[in-house]
Amino acid sequence: EKGGYEHFMLKEIYEQPTSIRNSMLGRLNTVNGEVVMGGIEEYEHKFMNAKRIIFVACGTSWHAGLVGEYMIESLARIPVEVEYASEFRYRNPIINSDDIVIAISQSGETADTLAALEIAKEKGALIYGICNVVGSSIARATDAGSYTHAGPEIGVASTKAFTAQVTILALMALTLAKKKGSISESRYRELALELNNIPNIVEKVLETNVAVEYISDIYKDAKNFLYLGRGINFPVALEGALKLKEISYIHAEGYPAAEMKHGPIALIDADMPVVAIATKKNSYEKVVSNIQEVKARNGKIIAVVTEGDTAVKEIADHVIEIPDVDDFFDPLITVIPLQLLSYHIAVMRGCNVDQPRNLAKSVTVE
Ligand code: M6R
C-alpha cells in the first residue's frame, strides 16, 4: 500500500509529478494552451462581476489560499482576501452577493471551513469549493467547485494536496485573467504551457532528495528553525515551518523575509538554522541582503536557490538548487525540498511521520 516507500508521506511527496498532472487533466489543453474550468464557466457572470474573492481555509490549505491571492490579484486583478475559517465564522463578516467565497480543503470535512461557508451562503455569496475528497461535506455544500484530483492523502502532513490546490488556483487565475482581458494572449499561452511542464520540473526537483537528507542530518537536533520567503514564496515559508513543526516537533516559524528586522532577527545565533527561499525572482536581491544579515549574526543558512546561482552560494552554509520557472509557479517547486527536509528530520528523530502526536487527518470538531 505504501508502494515500496517507508512512509505514506514520502510516497505522497514522490507522487507529486503525477498528482499535479492529474489536477490539470481535462482543464489545460496541451495542444492549444487553453484552460477551461467547468466550475467557473457555470458561474461566469458571477465571477466576472465579483467585487472580491475570499478564501476560507485552515492550516496548509490556508497557505495555498495565500498563494492564490498572489496569483489571482496579479493576473486577474480581482481583490482577494484570505481568512482563517475559524476567525471568519465568528466575526460577523461583511459579505454580500457580489462576493465569491472559496473554501479550500483537502478532506472537505474541516468543521471551521464548512461553518464559514454556511455563513457566507446565508449572506448571499456564491460559494465555491476546492476539495480533494469527492462527495465530501464541503463539496456538497458549495454551489460549484473544482476537485483537486490529488488522489487519497493518508499522511497527516499535507503534501500532494497542497501542490494540487496551488495547481487549481493557477488554473483559476489564468481562466479569470483571460475572461477579464487582464492578460495578453501571448503571456497567457506562455504561462499555460509552462504550467503544463511543471510536473516534469517537479520530477527533477525530487532529485534534491539526497542533498536534503545530508542537510537534515546536520540540523536534526536544532531546537528552532526560521523560514524566510518573499512575495509568492512567503506562504511557502509558512508551509515549510508548519511541516517541520507537525511531524518533527521542532519549533519553527515562517516569516516574510523583510519582517525579520522587525523582531525575529533578535533570535539569530549559531544555533538557529534559517531556511531561506532565494530563487532568482523579483525580490532576489532583497532576500540576499536578508541572508547577509543572518550570516552577520552567525546564523546558519540553508538556501533554496535557482540552478547556477552564485551570489547566495558564496554566503550560505548549504544550497539546494532547483530549476528556474516563472514566478507564478515557484511555490510548486520551492515547497518540495522543504517537504523533504521535514520528512528526513522527523525520521532521523524517530518520530511517527504519518501519524504525528495530537493530530488528526481531518479536524471535524472546532
Ligand atoms: O482537510 P483540510 O485541508 O481542510 O485540512 C486543513 C488542515 O487541518 C490541514 O491542512 C493541516 O494543517 C495539515 N495537517 C497540514 O499538514
Image (cartoon, rainbow, N blue to C red):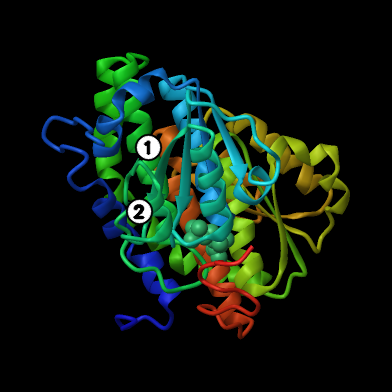
**Disc 2 residue type?**
Val
Residue drawn where x is 50% and y is 65% of the image: 340
Residue at image mark 2: 202
**Image quarter in which the N terminus is found:** bottom left
Against 364, residue 21 (above or below) is above
Which label sits on residue 170?
Answer: 1
Question: Which sits in the foreground, 91 or 165?
Answer: 91
Q: Residue at x 29, y 80 (%)?
A: 3
Q: Nearer the viewer, mark 1 or mark 2?
A: 1
Residue drawn 64% across the image and 58% down it: 241
Task: Measure the C-alpha gap from mark 1 to mark 2.
Answer: 16 Å
SS assignment at label 1: helix
Give the vertical position of 242 relative to 214 (above or below): above
Q: Decide which of 177, 103 is in the foreground and name it.
A: 103
Mark 1 and mark 2 lie on one chain; the one further toward the N terminus is: 1
The front one of 172 and 343 is 172
On screen, 6 above or below 79? below
Image coordinates of residue 360 in percent, x first then y, are 56, 73
Find residue 278 and report its horizontal and vertical position in percent: 57, 42
